[in-house]
Amino acid sequence: QLQLQESGPGLVKPSETLSLTCTVSGDSISSSSSYWGWIRQPPGKGLEWIGTIYHSGSTYYNPSLKSRVTISVDTSKNQFSLKLNSVTAADTAVYYCATAPPMTTVINWGQGILVTVSS
Amino acid sequence: QSALTQPASVSGSAGQSITISCTGTSSDVGSFNLVSWYQQHPGKAPKLMISEVTKRPSGVSNRFSGSKSGNTAFLTISGLQAEDEANYYCCSYAPTSTFGVLGGGTKLTVL
């Protein structure tokens, strides 16, 4: 059964870099045809797509975050990661890692991790 | 691409039926039968309720149904129960997207 688990610091200081990792079990990132990515949800607000990576390394980012975001894959650990730099309080959110096959909208979600940006 | 448009909130009494709309464009909802609906309770990850406009995953109550007309998709919940109170998000495939285009979400209140 496919499972995704986010990990990383729950508190990040303003202007620093938010770094999260998603560990995948039940599927292999390197051989899967699925997309792997991140979606966030500020407190009390809706879902916002951050970006996606394909096993080939191709990346796709939300234009509003593109200048600050990097998503990468470590196939040896079956993990993918998110880095968001120069964070502000507006980046406080629950961050979900997720996966979906191409040409579908059937998204498998991690449980989510709350990241608070505060000094 | 722009987010899909959903009403901010809907409400209904227990036992009644409600319908949530999700309006996109001819480039997404209108062109593909690839619309999903997700239910999200506070503090939980979204849960898939409907895929491909009308398909219910195993384990989802048959009180939930989906449909589409033109550029708008609909989620109907019949026989409302207290446990249905949650936020609902639609998501449509679009050629320029990877996970799809998300709606802004609708808060369902069961009176």
Image: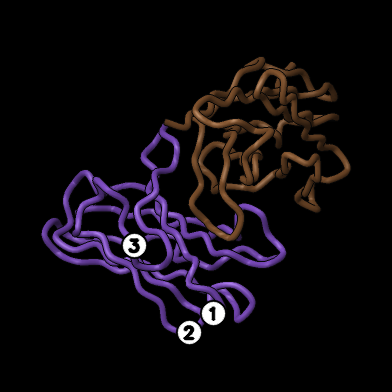
Chain colours: A brown, B purple
Q: Quadrant of residue B108?
A: bottom left
Does residue A104 appear left or right of residue B109 in this picture? Answer: right
Chain letter of the residue carrying label 2: B
Q: Residue at x 18, y 63 (%)?
A: B78
SS category of the residue bearing label 3: loop
- The circle drawn on residue A67 is none
Determine whether label 2 and label 1 are within 8 Å by CB.
yes
Q: CA distance from mark 1 to mark 3?
A: 17 Å
- The circle drawn on residue B55 is 3
Does residue B110 appear left or right of residue B29 in this picture? Answer: left
Q: Residue furthest front?
A: A31
Front disc: 1 or 3: 3
Q: Residue at x 66, y 40 (%)?
A: A37
- Mark 3 belongs to which amino acid? Lys
Answer with mark 2 or mark 1, whichever residue precedes in sequence: 1
The answer to whether dots 1 and 3 both sit on one chain is: yes
Residue A115 in the image, given as x and y percentages of width and height: 63, 24
Q: Quadrant of residue B27?
A: bottom right
Local crowd size for mark 3, using a 10 Å CA cut-off: few (<14), some (14–19), many (≥20): some
Chain letter of the residue carrying label 3: B
SS category of the residue bearing label 1: loop
